């Protein structure tokens, strides 16, 4: 069964490709290589023994998307990761985010609506909840005004998919992830952002390697236990496995609604300082950091209620924060060796 994975050479995408290939799916990756490199293909091959089909494609080019689907009419499902994903960057460059995250989605759906049946997994985000009023966050929590253009593109994306599914043969699952971290235990693939990392963990591991002078902790005056922002950090391999389970749910026609939504997290919130401490414990290194002002677009805390994913999907996060940090550190050391 042929599955299209957009952004399949990215951090979460590449780990999901591994899990799909391990389950016997034939994978086609499209990626524009804007935030990754072709070397990831080799890592996927080293883990699974099989190199997936890859096509360099910018999903913002409508004609290219149309041409791709004309040549690949036997695609049974799409997992859509391709998007710009940094909260801070989206505040600084909103039009890039609206073009990249919305246009690409629309062009994909325009092709899928031509099919008799289409299965679509959407890479959404807990940012759709804004600063939720109650913790842990359930799927029924109100969608608040987005705190960033990135979060807004995920809200709009969910609305576009829901509206489209009502009038087409598209079935979809929206996966709202919390904060993915870590790497494959083999250290063959992992998180390798181009340029300065926008996410906490790669900045921590790069600082641990001496590539960054020190880590900036954005704010220690939040109303949390230690004053730093709290997030739900989930191991990327756990996250990847959830995508395969969700895809099989659609392929087996077990979905109860045209569009279903699931939170993917551990159900536990960890502060920035707790993440630093977990890194220090697994690496044996003291991490240099400084407290700086809050960053625009950041919220105080977010962690998931995962009951729905646990019971309906039969999926549960397995790895601890320390295990995830250890895998991230192993990957960083390998990349820099």
Image (cartoon, rainbow, N blue to C red):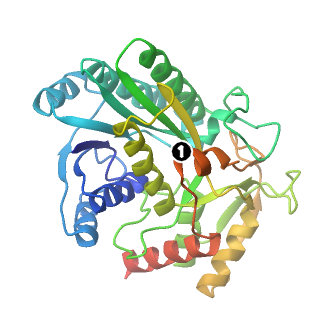
The residue lying furthest to the top in this view is: 167
Give residue 312's position: percent from left, percent from top.
57, 44
Quickly name the residue at label 1. 86
Q: Nearer the viewer, residue 101 or 286?
A: 101
- Is 9 displayed left or right of 150 in the figure? left
Give residue 133's position: percent from left, percent from top.
82, 36
> Residue shown at 51%/67% (left/top)?
182
Screen quadrant of the N terminus: top left
The residue lying furthest to the left in this view is: 71
- Is 31 displayed left or right of 318 in the figure? left
Q: Is residue 36 above or below residue 205?
A: above
> Residue shown at 59%/34% (left/top)?
151
Whether residue 207 can be seen here: no
- Is 79 displayed left or right of 284 in the figure? left
> Residue shown at 57%/66% (left/top)?
318
Q: Nearer the viewer, residue 213 or 312?
A: 312
Splitting the image into 4 quarters, where does residue 204 fall?
bottom right
Q: Is residue 193 above or below residue 313?
A: below
Give residue 53's position: percent from left, percent from top.
16, 51
Q: How many marks?
A: 1
Screen quadrant of the C terminus: bottom left
Splitting the image into 4 quarters, where does residue 126 fall?
top right
Whether residue 5 can be seen here: yes
> Residue shown at 82%/40% (left/top)?
134
Local secondary structure at mark 1? loop
Splitting the image into 4 quarters, where does residue 225 fall?
bottom right
Q: Is residue 51 above or below residue 296?
A: below
Give residue 206's position: percent from left, percent from top.
52, 71
């Amino acid at each position: 069964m042929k599955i299209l994975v957009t952004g399949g050479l990215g951090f979460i995408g590449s780990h999901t490709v591994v899990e799909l290939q391990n389950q016997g799916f034939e994978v086609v990756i499209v990626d524009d290589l804007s935030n990754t490199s072709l070397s990831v293909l080799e890592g996927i091959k080293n883990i699974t023994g099989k190199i997936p089909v890859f096509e360099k494609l910018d999903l913002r080019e409508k004609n290219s998307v149309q041409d791709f689907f004309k040549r690949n009419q036997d695609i049974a499902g799409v997992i859509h990761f391709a998007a710009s994903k940094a909260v801070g960057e989206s505040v600084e460059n909103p039009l890039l985010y609206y073009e990249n995250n919305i246009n690409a989605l629309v062009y994909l759906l325009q092709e899928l609506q031509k099919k008799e049946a289409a299965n679509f997994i959407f890479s959404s985000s807990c940012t759709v909840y804004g600063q939720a009023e109650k913790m842990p966050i359930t799927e029924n929590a109100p969608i608040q005004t987005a705190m960033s253009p990135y979060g807004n593109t995920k809200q709009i994306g969910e609305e576009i998919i829901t509206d489209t599914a009502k009038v087409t043969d598209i079935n979809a699952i929206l996966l709202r992830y919390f904060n993915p971290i870590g790497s494959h235990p083999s250290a063959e693939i992992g998180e390798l952002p181009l340029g300065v990392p926008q996410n906490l963990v790669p900045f921590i591991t790069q600082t641990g390697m001496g590539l960054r002078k020190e880590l900036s902790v954005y704010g220690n005056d939040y109303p949390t236990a230690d004053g730093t922002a709290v997030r739900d950090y989930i191991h990327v391999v756990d996250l990847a496995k959830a995508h395969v389970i969700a895809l099989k749910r659609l392929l087996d026609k077990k979905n109860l609604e045209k569009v279903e939504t699931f939170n993917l997290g551990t159900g536990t919130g960890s502060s920035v300082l707790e993440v630093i401490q977990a890194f220090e414990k697994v690496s044996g290194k003291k991490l240099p950091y400084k407290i700086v002002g809050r960053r625009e677009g950041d919220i105080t805390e977010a962690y998931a209620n995962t009951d729905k994913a646990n019971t309906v999907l039969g999926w549960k996060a397995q790895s601890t924060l320390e295990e995830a940090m250890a895998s991230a550190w192993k990957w960083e050391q390998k990349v820099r060796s």
